[in-house]
Amino acid sequence: QVQLVESGGGLVQPGGSLRLSCAASGNIFRINDMGWYRQPPGKERELVARITDSGSTKYADSVKGRFTISRDSAKNTVYLQMNSLKPEDTAIYYCNAFIMPMSSTVHSYWGQGTQVTVSS
């Protein structure tokens, strides 16, 4: 059984910073791409950033230059450093990973989500 557990969300003032973490655990053989998505209130879920197992990254235009995605493969963990936060960054942030469990094929897994609120 594979789990993704997020942490690091909260309330921050505009211009502030937060760092999200997502740790994968369980019966893992290999982790491929990892990423962060978000769902603002009343809107659909959208890509924020993704990182491959070789370290290549992709960002949504709205967060380029402000957010940085990274991963620690030894810890099966992906991070999202969010700087210069804006009220429009307010959303539930979800971790996603393509994971190959032992004796199985690759599946897409999601974390439970963590709330990020940017407000003065």
Image (cartoon, helix red, strand yellow):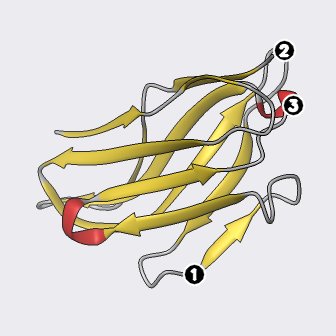
Q: Amino acid at mark 3?
A: Glu
Residue at the disc numbered 1: 56
Up/down of 3 relative to 23, above or below: above
Residue drawn at (29%, 61%) of the image? 105
Q: Amino acid at mark 1?
A: Ser
Secondary element under disc 1, as helix, strand or loop, is loop
Left or right: where does residue 11 sit relative to residue 4?
Answer: right
Q: Earlier in the sequence, mark 2 or mark 3?
A: 2
Left or right: where does residue 15 sit relative to residue 99?
Answer: right
Q: Earlier in the sequence, mark 1 or mark 2?
A: 2
Secondary element under disc 2, as helix, strand or loop, is loop
Residue at the disc numbered 2: 42
Quadrant in which the N terminus is drawn: top left
Residue drawn at (62%, 62%) of the image? 68
Q: Residues within 10 Å of mark 3 (few under 14, many from 20)?
A: few
Left or right: where does residue 83 sit relative to residue 102?
Answer: right
